[in-house]
């Protein structure tokens, strides 16, 4: 499974797509995700590229390491890959889950009576699509 960020949502969308690419390249997705989520969704304390950089520093990445990765060819290529995927899949919103780049899972057809049933049904849909010939 690959997780991408889209750059068409919010004023920091493009900067957060770059940041997500940095997280992937530096292999710190698990460390930086909760910090970015907290600052963007919960406390609304991330307003600038500098705030994003500080989130990485809080996750244990040095500022110099972040800057070097941000300006690297690998990160720029990964950003382009994310942008192309969003365009190719005609994304209009998130979250969006695709299987084999062909099938988009639509949550409105999955039971949401409780989290356990939802997870089981979601898993069943993914497994069906993965095994579809």
Image (spheres, rainbow, N blue to C red):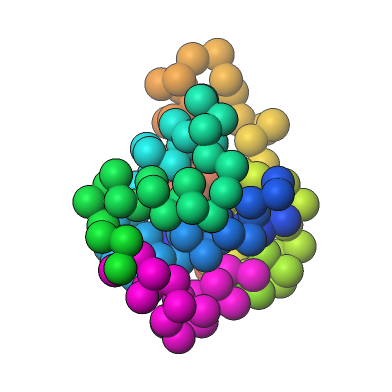
* Residue drawn at point x = 71 percent, y = 71 percent: 88
Please provide percent x and percent y for residue 108: 69, 31
Q: Is residue 47 left or right of residue 23?
A: right
Q: Is residue 64 above or below residue 74?
A: above
Q: Nearer the viewer, residue 99 or 31?
A: 31
Please provide percent x and percent y for residue 96: 62, 48
Q: Is residue 9 above or below residue 14?
A: above
Which of the 4 image quarters holds residue 119? top left
Q: Is residue 74 left or right of residue 15?
A: left
Which of the 4 image quarters holds residue 33? top left
* Residue drawn at point x = 64 percent, y = 70 percent: 83
Q: How many marks?
A: 0
Q: Quadrant of the N terminus?
A: bottom left
Q: Is residue 59 above or below residue 74?
A: above
Q: Is residue 131 visible?
A: no
* Residue drawn at point x = 51 percent, y = 25 percent: 42
Q: Is residue 71 magenta?
A: yes
Q: Is residue 35 above or below residue 16?
A: above
Q: Is residue 39 visible?
A: yes
Please provide percent x and percent y for residue 103: 63, 58
Please provide percent x and percent y for residue 65: 29, 68
Q: Nearer the viewer, residue 15 or 54?
A: 54
Residue at the far left in the pictured view: 60
Which region of the structure is painted magenta?
Answer: 65-83
* Residue drawn at point x = 55 percent, y = 13 percent: 113
| Main secondary structure found in the magenta portion | helix
Residue at the far bottom in the pictured view: 73
């Amino acid at each position: 499974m690959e997780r991408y960020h889209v750059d068409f949502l919010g004023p920091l969308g493009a900067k957060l797509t770059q940041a997500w690419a940095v997280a992937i390249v530096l292999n710190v997705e698990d460390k930086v995700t909760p910090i970015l989520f907290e600052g963007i969704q919960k406390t609304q304390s991330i307003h600038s590229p500098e705030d994003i950089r500080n989130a990485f520093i809080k996750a244990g990445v040095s500022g110099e390491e972040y800057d070097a990765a941000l300006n690297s060819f690998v990160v720029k290529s990964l950003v382009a890959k994310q942008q192309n995927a969003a365009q190719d899949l005609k994304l209009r919103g998130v979250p969006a889950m695709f299987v084999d780049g062909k099938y988009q899972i639509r949550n409105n057809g999955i039971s949401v009576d409780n989290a356990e049933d939802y997870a089981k049904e979601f898993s069943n849909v993914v497994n069906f699509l993965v095994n579809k010939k």
